[in-house]
Structures are given as structure tokens and as C-alpha cells.
Amino acid sequence: MAILPTLLLALLGTATAPTETEAERLHRKGVFCQEVIERTDCAIENFEALMRTSTTSRELVTDGMLRLIRLYRAAGDEESTKPLLRRFWEAGMRRESRGHVPYSTRFLPGDFDVLINVDVARIVDAPLTQRLGPDARDTLFACDEARRHDLEDKRRWNRAKRKAAKTGRDFGTVLYEELDRERDAEAKREQRRRRGGQPSPIFFEANCEVALALGHADLGSWRRMTGVFAHRDFARSVTLAEIPGLEAQLARAVADARLIEIAPDHWAVPGLTYEGDAVELAHLDHEELLIAPSALIDEIIAARRARKRKVDRGLEQLVYKVPKDTEFFVVLTQQATVDLGLGSLKPAARTFLQALLPKPKGVQIAGVLGDDFGLFTRVPTDNPVKGRMLVAIARKLIDNQSEKDAETEALLRSLDVAEATDRRALLASYVLSAAQIEKLVLE
């Protein structure tokens, strides 16, 4: 029977579609070796060849990379994963990506310099999400308050259970300590808010209410959600949502008085406010909905009608250099990165660190879900010498932290900090398995 896998592999190599590219062939063979005939050596060989292939098929490269990392780790070859992680950005920077944010993003105010993009459909369909089950999906997209409350109770219970088992303490005592800790954290957040701290952007505050007004039980049926805001004032924020069948849903919502029409393609959500301002909606493009405070929305509608591009060009360029095959990504411009990263420091400390560290030209953070979860951060810099020094310091800190306990070491083993090949950016990459994600997020 040992000849059967070899025969199947031979047939696989010859039965190819006429239009199949080399990258597609290598990926297909690698998956076959990994999942069907379970030959690790064959899978590694094909995925390694895929990594060496010049291709524009970003999704194949990323999926092959995550699979290869899992295979290396299973074989105990952790060191081979580190240079592989850096390929995510190297492959993605060869050409700019377009169309992975809503078209109307270009009409947003020029002071908007932070962008969060969530590809809902990709997350819902990802193998990792499917494996983790309904709790994972609902943690991200549920709008029902009872369901969200149940999920939080479950996570709190599991955290207390693990902590009690680890420390040998009474479970009930640990559980009440968890409740007290959460209440204290919430009280401190409220105190910061009252002292003039930044509000939560509308992206995190109004999406569910809008979904319910449109007749959705949750956000899982939306195609994409993009939140954009000004780092100096988070209240200057909007959501752009891509929603299949939007036009019909808007018409039904108006007919059922769940939306109030203000003007053609412009509505209010009855009773819904954000930071004391009414929340309004605008239909800017096909299946594309703008959610914004009333003080902002007229400006954006006017720019769309005049086709006047207003978005910050630096933000736009950073977005275009994020690969398309991401489940979510976050981008900050240069000024947003500096102010948010160092803004809480005293002037003397801030001046010292700005002189010591390379000057960031922005931040790009991309998340990819396959059977594992990959988080890839890129910080374009202006000084390769300082960048190299910062990488060395970071690696030393990681090594020192890893020596403290086995649990920390297991997590940090997945982290790679490096300088980009062209020395124009600092890279930090992190890949977690489904088991690690379940422990960190769901529990």
C-alpha cells in the first residue's frame, strides 16, 4: 500500500488545468501532500518552492506561508519560521493594492489619519473562525446584548478557573477578584474620559445600532467595515460599510420607520446619538453606507457629489501598500504615530526618545486568518542605523522576558522582530495557533 501516496502524487502532478500557474500548481500540490496523503516532506518541499516563485497571487503566498510555518513548528524547526515571516511584507510591497477599502474613503476630511479596515466576509469564512465555532464569530460581530453578556461571563469564568487551578486558590475568591478588577478598570476609563480623554470612535459605538435599524441581527452579514478618524479628536470619526443588498434594506427601513429620510440618499436613525450629536447615514456608492455624526456628514456628502478628493494622501499611500489578502488592517500616518505613541510622555522624555529612535513614517498592521492567525506590523523609518539598533534592543528584551517563565516563552517564541530587507522599515510578525487564540481571546 506504500505505493498509493506516490501514485496519487504523480497523478496530481499531471492532472493540471491548462491555465494553472506555477504558483497555483505548487500550492495545490503542497495542500494535497499536507492534507490528503499527509507527507510532511512533500508539503514542505512544495510550499518552499512556492515562496521562491515570483507571483502576484498574494493569497496563495500568504496561505502557503502560514502552512509552512505550521509544518516547520511541527518538525521542531522554529528558526526557519523567522525569515519566512518577513516575506509577508516583502511580497506585498512589490505592487500597490487597490480596492480593499471603500471607494468613498477618498472623500473623507484631510485630518482623518487613522484607518481600521475589517473584511467581515473573510473573517467569517476563515478556517480558524470556523474551527473556533460560534463563540468566535459572536465575540466579534454579535449585536445582541444578552449574547455579548453571556460571552463575557464565560470568558471571566474560564479566566478565574485557570487562575485558581494555577495558584491553588479558591475559585470563588478568584472569580470575585476578576469582577473587582474589571470594575476598577471601567472606573479608571470613565475617570480618564471625564478628565478630557478621547472618546471611542463611532466605529465602535454605532455600527450595531445601524445594523439593527437595517434589519440585521448582527454585523456578520456585512461585507466590510472601515472606520476612519482624526487622531487629535476621535469624535471626528466615521464608518464606511459595504453591505450586500443595501438599497433594498434602506427602502424597507424607511417604510418601517426605522430610518427617517432627510434628503435623497441621506437618513437619520431615530434616537441614535454619538457624543451628543445625531447619527446619520448616507448612501455614497453602490452597497456602500456612510455612518457619521450629523456635524460631519454634510461635508462628506458634498465632497462626494463634487468628486473632490480630500483624504490625506499619506494615509492613502500607506493603505495602498497593505496587501489585499488580509482579514483586517490598521494604518496610522506619521503624525498620528508620533502623537499617539509618545503623546503621553513628558516633554523631556519625548524629546529624548525622538532623538534616540528612528523617525516612523507611519504604522501598518495587518491580520491574516488561515488555520492560524498571523499579525504583521510594518513601521517605515527614516534611519536604518537607528532601526537596526532598535531591533537589537527589542530582541534582547524578548530573550530576557522569555527566560522568566515557560508560558511567556511559548508566546514570545512566535514573535519575530527584524529590519526589512531594504532597511526602510522595522517589522514585527506574530503567528498564533487556534489553541493559542482560544486561550487568549475566547477564554
Image (cartoon, rainbow, N blue to C red):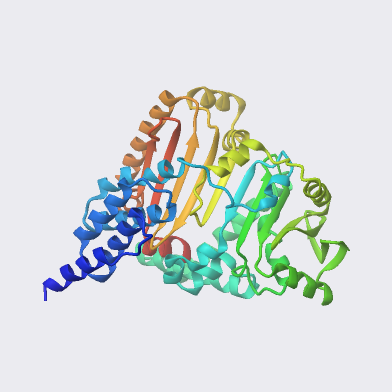
Q: Residue at x 48, y 27 (%)?
A: 357
- In this view of the protein, which residue sits in the foreground, 101 or 85? 101
**420 or 165, nearer to the observer:** 420
Q: Is residue 440 above or below residue 51?
A: below
- Check the image and report above or below for 220 versus 182: below
**Residue closest to the far front:** 18
Name above or below for residue 442 compared with residue 375.
Answer: below
Question: Percent x, y for residue 69?
Answer: 31, 54
Give residue 409's position: percent from left, percent from top.
Answer: 32, 50
Q: Is residue 404 above or below residue 214?
A: above
Name the residue: 45% across, 55% down.
368
- Image quarter for residue 76? bottom left
Q: Is residue 434 left or right of residue 104?
A: left
Residue 75: % across, % down:
21, 56
Q: What count of labels does the image hold? A: 0
Q: Nearer the viewer, residue 353 or 383?
A: 383
User: Which quadrant: the C terminus?
Assistant: bottom left
